[in-house]
Amino acid sequence: MTTAGIDAVEIRTGNLKLDLAETFAPEKDEDPAKYTKGLGLHASSFPDAYEDIVTMGANAAKRLMDRKGLEPEDIGRIDVATESAFDHSKPVSTYIAGCLEDVYDDDFHHANKGERKFACVAGTQAIDDAVNWIQAGKNRGRAALVIATDTALYARGDSGEATQGAGAVAMLIDEDPDLVSVDPVQGFGSADETDFLKPNQQFPSVDGKRSMQVYLARMREAMMDVESQRDLHPDDFAVVPFHIPFPGMVRKGAALGFRHISRGTDVEEELAEEIGMQPRLEDFEDEEAYRDALSAYTDDLTETDRYREWYDKTVEPTLGISRYVGNWYTGSVHLARASALREARSNGRNLDEQKLLVCSYGSGAQAEIHVETVQPGWEEEIAALNVEEQLRDRYDLTFEEYEQIHDVHNYDESTDIDAFTTPEEEFVFDGWGRMGERKYTYVE
Ligand code: CAA
């Protein structure tokens, strides 16, 4: 079978920043540590008045195409994953292709375009689709552009407000990829859930606490589905990127994952002296008692050196970027992968041919877990990212300015303010067309 996967990645953050500890917490009369330590977030990224899912996606895609020396002719497929689409019919990929056609000589008329929706897991599903397209031999030598782009905004005062974020991740999916190949093994956990949804509304209805339980339940199912195909062991994976609604959620997901995949292995035996063996259902009278014992075991597990070392090496490095940008919904798990590879590169850690266990999740709800193999070209690809500059150059909002920009992006408000930043060499939102479509232009 043809080897296919992610050949290149580009990250584009919104141009504004809200500092959670310094700016948000005091207004909410909350301890800043709730955000920085509890949720694990320092800042959120926001789109300026001229930014949206199209500009962020197109800007990421353009940088990727320029860097790889690609022309529209080289791209056979453009899939956008988003849960922030503003058009119920015309896919965001057509808007992004339209932007790109303004700056390249040729067009994308030959490219199959679409939009993938399943909350945050849609970005991973779009990668799967592109890999399948290549491995089915339908790509005629062309690559696919997958763009995960979202403005993850919540209604003001919603419990999710602190986890907001905005940004895009563009990925080139190709044969013989330079970054990671996608292995055939994948597992799913999927159920009809009403934990987080947007029925004909811009901002989500969220059952915050329940959404966390649903995340863990679906992850567990997906892990079992993978285990039905291959054995899992904590030491098999160099990095375990999770979907990151906020880093505190990943802390819980990682503990569940480690407990699950160390069950019945030498790691469980090794830890038994310190915290006992894992509880087994058959040793309990009812399921509730078993669940309580499992939860107590997990708490003890997270205190062990064995777990902490594993977490610090395989999970913590995935959180580096998210802590400063918040939730990017469809892009979050792809930020997690990039973040870990970036940190490995700066620490001189060799990841050639190492395995990643990628744990994606979307509310509503579905988890997908699959395995990737890091390719020898990964360091060069990761070195090309300019994330530091982007994070550093963001405009730091006051709380009043945050309120204004939230209103600018709220469809129910008609706030019009001057942008906080000056666009430079980027696509910008440029008003409305005669049929209500959004219009864009490239600013030199
Ligand atoms: N110092 C240190 N930690 C503190 C603290 C302090 N002063 N104050 C609070 N904390 C801790 C709390 O103990 C808690 O940690 P634990 O869960 O480990 O106990 C953490 O900070 C958060 O505090 P709260 O639970 O009190 O926070 P909250 O109720 O205000 O909000 C939330 C939490 C419900 C998750 C909310 O952020 C939310 O609704 N988020 C949106 C939904 C979401 O992200 N769900 C995640 C799963 S769904 C998904 O993954 C899809 C997606 O992208 C949305």
Image (cartoon, helix red, strand yellow):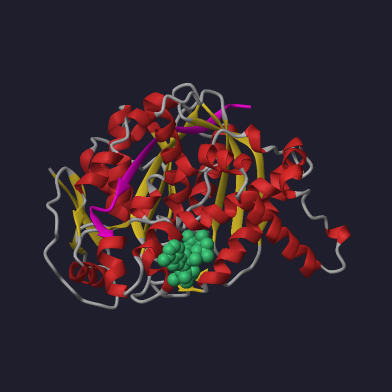
Whether residue 444 sits left or right of residue 386 in the image: it is left
- Tell me which segment is drawn in magenta: 1-19
Residue 330, image x and y in percent? 45, 53
Which residue is nearer to you in this view: 153 or 93? 153
Which residue is nearer to you in this view: 232 or 373? 232
Whether residue 229 sits left or right of residue 24 in the image: it is right
Specify whether residue 153 is painted magenta. no
Residue beneath the point at 41% across and 40% down: 339
Residue beneath the point at 26% across and 62% down: 22
Asked whether the viewer can see residue 347, the reply is yes
Residue 321, image x and y in percent? 37, 46
Task: Indicate the quadrant where residue 419 lies.
Answer: bottom left
Q: Residue furthest front?
A: 274
Whether residue 207 sits left or right of residue 413 in the image: it is right
The quadrant the N terminus occupies is top right
Q: Is 76 drawn above or below residue 278 in the view shown?
A: above
Q: Is 94 drawn above or below residue 1 in the view shown?
A: below
Q: Is 190 drawn above or below residue 346 in the view shown?
A: below
The quadrant the C terminus occupies is top left
Q: Main secondary structure of the magenta part?
A: strand
Residue 118, image x and y in percent? 53, 59
Task: Indicate the quadrant where residue 134 lies.
Answer: top right
Which residue is nearer to you in this view: 399 or 182? 399
Residue 353, image x and y in percent? 56, 24
Residue beneath the point at 41% across and 34% down: 343
Which residue is nearer to you in this view: 101 or 193? 193
Q: How many marks?
A: 0
Asked whether the viewer can see residue 93, the reply is no
